């Protein structure tokens, strides 16, 4: 019995030691390697998490950002904290896209923010209508009362294969207000 407990303790210790990652803050712009946990140790993500909204007349765009923590990438022994998003877009009173109720799936995400600095993120979004993806800057600011963010999107660089003829249906430039 004593040997069984010792063996189990040794096994648990070995597994926990081999599973350790070197923790690196997301703001550290080094070349990350295996056994790294790219972690939001300084809570940079807190300013963008939650719901953001733009409204004008009968049109609105709502996006909800959530933090995924300690996501492990298989095969490279690396973990990461990152931000995923879901959105809803209404244009002139007509629902264009609504994925607010979709499950957050790190392997099949439709929008994400990548930390650049405390007030700027790289914004990557996939239009579920056209299945086209654009990226750009997501910049945080304040107008004295509200936390606001502006974004502008552009086409991804590179060659496009089997692209649909449907135009990108989401707004490519907006100013959003963080909801309380």
Image: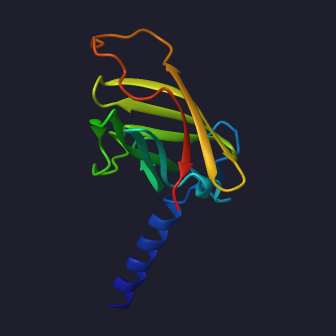
Q: Residue at x 46, y 24 (%)?
A: 134
- Is 173 displayed left or right of 30 in the figure? left
Provide residue 24's location: percent of width, then percent of height.
Answer: 65, 51
Provide residue 144's location: percent of width, then percent of height.
Answer: 72, 54
Q: Does residue 116 appear anywhere in the picture?
A: no
Please tell me which residue lies in front, 38 or 3: 38
Residue located farthest toward the bottom when viewing the structure as drawn: 1
- Is 103 displayed left or right of 51 in the figure? left
- Is 127 displayed left or right of 172 in the figure? left
- Is 59 displayed left or right of 51 in the figure? left
Quadrant in the picture for the N terminus: bottom left
Q: Residue at x 38, y 11 (%)?
A: 160
Provide residue 25's location: percent of width, then percent of height.
Answer: 66, 52
Q: Residue at x 32, y 10 (%)?
A: 161
Q: Does residue 151 appear anywhere in the picture?
A: yes
Find residue 10 and report its image quarter.
bottom left
């Amino acid at each position: 019995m004593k040997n069984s407990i010792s063996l189990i303790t040794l096994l648990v210790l070995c597994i926990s030691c081999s599973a350790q990652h070197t923790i690196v803050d997301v703001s550290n712009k080094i070349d990350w390697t295996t056994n790294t946990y790219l972690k939001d140790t300084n809570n940079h993500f807190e300013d963008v998490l939650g719901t953001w909204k733009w409204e004008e007349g009968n049109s609105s765009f709502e996006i909800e950002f959530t933090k995924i923590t300690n996501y492990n990438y298989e095969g490279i022994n690396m973990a990461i904290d990152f931000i995923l998003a879901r959105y809803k877009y209404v244009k002139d009173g007509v629902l264009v896209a609504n994925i607010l109720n979709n499950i957050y799936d790190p392997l099949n995400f439709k929008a994400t923010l990548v930390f650049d600095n405390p007030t700027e993120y790289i914004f990557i979004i996939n239009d579920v209508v056209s299945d086209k993806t654009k990226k750009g800057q997501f910049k945080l600011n304040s107008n004295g009362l509200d936390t606001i963010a502006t974004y502008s999107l552009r086409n991804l660089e590179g060659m496009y294969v089997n692209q649909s003829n449907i135009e990108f249906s989401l707004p490519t430039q907006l100013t959003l207000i963080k909801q309380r």
